[in-house]
Amino acid sequence: MAALRTLGPKAAAALDEELMSTGAYSIDQLMELAGLAVSQAMFALSPPQKTPKILVACGPGNNGGDGLVAARHLYHFGYQPTMYFPKQTKNELYQRLRTQLEHLKVPFTDDFIGAAGKSDYIIDAIFGFSFSGEVREPFPAVIRALAEGEVPVLAVDAPSSWNIEDGPPKDGPGKGYNPHALVSMTAPKPLVKWFKGRHFVGGRFVSQEIAEKYGFDVPPYQGSDQVVEIGSHGERL
């Protein structure tokens, strides 16, 4: 079967802008839908009865916001999430997302390595499709631990430290990092040609008209599912 078309960095950024302008979506809505998709991908990978303890690593941008939302849904699905969110912003949206988790008594930790050793699964919501340049503190050691650790990882939209078009770094903390699973938001990104694990697409809110305008495919979502599993390189299953 033909692979789903990928969405490059400029198109992905333009799509987000259009969704929040003429599309009339708020950033809250898009983050909520993305986080729900992440939580459904986690459930499809391994239900809470099998892997209850989930460590969610969040960066300071939208990818981290998706992780915060996902953790709330995972809690209600029956998981026991723990949050690693070291670079917190004063943005009101992120503060509200954190408060929602605190009301559920979801713990926050500053010790990623220690928490990872007690976890059944890790969600990598550190850097997304807009990442470029070098990995800055405190994330080099975190990404190195993701690459070298034995705990399976679900990456959100992109494995952290990967370039959206050029894939994994040739050196640095992300060298050798290829997570167990990936959930691509809206459409796979060009980096999937280097990816080897289980692959989901999420973000069930885009019209066929918008998809054609930006040159990607809406996957065949079933029933009430917010994610579709596809091949590691984006091929339809």
Image: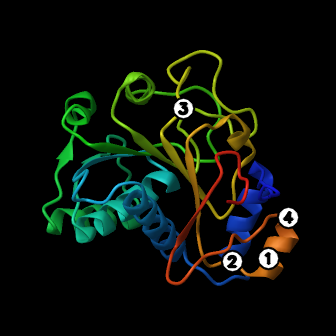
* Of the image marks 4 and 1, the number of the one nearer the N terminus: 1
Task: Name the disc covering residue 178, or none.
Answer: 3
Q: CA distance from mark 3 to mark 1?
A: 31 Å
Q: Is residue 140 above or below residue 38?
A: above
Going 22% across and 32% down the picture, which residue do you hit? 111
* Of the image marks 2 and 4, the number of the one nearer the N terminus: 2
Q: Is residue 46 left or right of residue 115?
A: right
Residue that badge 1 annotates:
210
**Mark toward the viewer: 3 or 1:** 3
Viewer-proximal residue among 178 and 18: 178
Task: Point out residue 214 in the picture as x, y percentages from the top left corner.
Answer: 83, 66
The crowd level at tag 1 (other Cα within 10 Å; few <14, some 14-19, many 20+) is some
* Of the image marks 3 and 1, the number of the one nearer the N terminus: 3
Q: CA distance from mark 3 to mark 4?
A: 26 Å
Q: Is residue 51 above or below residue 143?
A: below
Going 82% across and 81% down the picture, which residue do you hit? 209
Going 36% across and 59% down the picture, which residue do you hit? 68
Q: CA distance from mark 2 to mark 4?
A: 12 Å
Task: Name the disc covering residue 228, or none.
Answer: none
Secondary structure of the residue carrying numbered label 3? loop
Q: Is residue 86 left or right of residue 140?
A: left
Secondary structure of the residue carrying numbered label 1? helix
Task: Point out residue 88 in the picture as x, y percentages from the top left corner.
Answer: 35, 48
Task: Point out residue 18 in the picture as x, y percentages from the top left corner.
Answer: 73, 73
Q: Quick check: marks 4 and 1 in contact, CB under 8 Å?
A: no
Report whether residue 90 is seen: yes
Secondary structure of the residue carrying numbered label 4? loop
Residue that badge 4 annotates:
215
* Of the image marks 3 and 4, the number of the one nearer the N terminus: 3
Q: In this view, which residue lies farthest toward the top?
A: 171
Give the amino acid type for the residue marked by disc 1 in the picture: Ile
